[in-house]
Image (cartoon, rainbow, N blue to C red):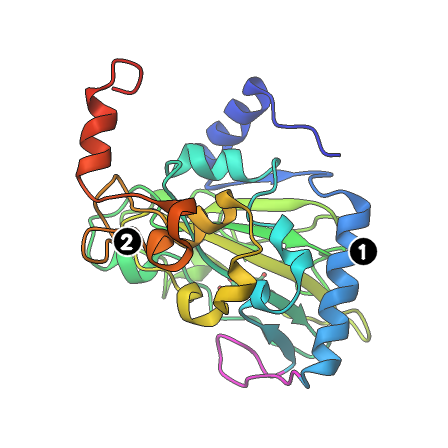
Amino acid sequence: MTAVLDETTLAQHLARIDDQGFTVIEDAVEPELVAALRDTIRRLQVELGIEPLGTAAEGHSTLRMYNLLAKDPVFQAMPVHPQVLPIVEALLDPGCLLSGMTAIDIGPGEDAQPMHGDDIVMSRHLIRPHAPMMVTSMWALTDFTAESGGTRYIPGSHRLPVIPRNELGRHDVRALEMPAGAVMIFHGSLWHGGGPNTSSDDWRLGVNVQFCPGFVRQQQNHYLAIPTDVAATFSDRLLELLGYRLYKGAMGHIDGRSPGEVVFGERFAETAYRDAEARRASPLDP
Ligand SMILES: O=C(O)CCC(=O)C(=O)O
């Protein structure tokens, strides 16, 4: 059983993200969960015949797998993990959404992924620097080293007024080295990318568990990707993170009802405006 983050540790992680754009939680993930996630991903890669996708972003020697929650129950532990979710909630708010989950297994011979910010799509509409429109947690399921493709990143780049696209030489690009079981959490504007894998036989397996504010479009469409009978087995908190509740009591409704009520009935009963107004009328819930 993993301990919940205490207030002091939480504040330290938030201060590091504010200053550097990222933090690393050592020993975040229980060793049994690391092993179960790694074994499941490697099994699914074979069963599903996963092949490199061949784009610059996805790589020619990298096995990527999307829509993990539909593929095996073991992945349900990731978005709600007590070492990670409180940091994400503090950076966004408790109405945040799971944007996507991707297993990224970087193989020998892979080139560096083009560097980018995970919230670059939203950044184009905002004046930089801005609040994170994405928060990414990168889970190491094998050791991340500079040779095996540890994530490249520029500390502090979330604060730059312009993205460092064409002037990488002027910046301090570092390789993330962290052992299996550690998690890096970073601001969506941090300039980063998967590293080149220069090893002869070392595959670097990580999972990107990404969150966005409740008012931003999710990168992966969970409503259509996860069959309803599979989603019905998820915890309430996980379903909230997928978007089955309304954001701020108003966003995402269907004829006044929450997506959760439409799909799961009474379990997620929520009426747009009316319930939020009733909550605000309560002295206990201003
Ligand atoms: O694999 C990594 O280290 C980073 C991957 C990444 O940034 C992405 O795919 O957006």
Tell me what residue is drawn at x 35 percent, y 52 percent.
Answer: 261
Magenta stretch, residue numbers? 50-60
Residue behind mark 2: 162
In the rendered structure, the answer to whether residue 262 lies left or right of residue 145 reads: left
Residues at marks 1 and 2, CA–CA distance in whole angstroms? 40 Å
Tell me if I can see residue 91 in this picture: yes
Whether the residue carrying mark 1 lies under 8 Å from ligand 1 is answered with: no
Q: Which amino acid lies under the numbered mark 2 shown in the image of this protein?
A: Val
| Label 1 or label 2, whichever comes before in sequence order | 1
Tell me what residue is drawn at x 59 percent, y 46 percent.
Answer: 184
In percent of width and height, residue 256 lies at 19, 51
Please say if 78 is above or below 168: above
Q: Secondary structure at mark 1?
A: helix
Tell me if I can see residue 194 in this picture: no
In percent of width and height, residue 124 lies at 23, 60
Please say if 147 is above or below 1: below
Between 178 and 251, which is closer to the camera in this rendering?
251
Question: Which residue of the protein is positioned furthest toward the front in this rendering?
Answer: 266
* Numbered tag placed on residue 35 in the rendering: 1
Q: Quadrant of the N terminus?
A: top right
- Tell me where residue 205 sits by quadrant: bottom right
- Magenta includes 52? yes
In percent of width and height, residue 188 lies at 41, 51
Tell me what residue is drawn at x 64 percent, y 77 percent.
Answer: 63
Magenta: main secondary structure equals loop
Tell me what residue is drawn at x 32 percent, y 47 percent.
Answer: 214
Between 101 and 15, which is closer to the camera in this rendering?
101
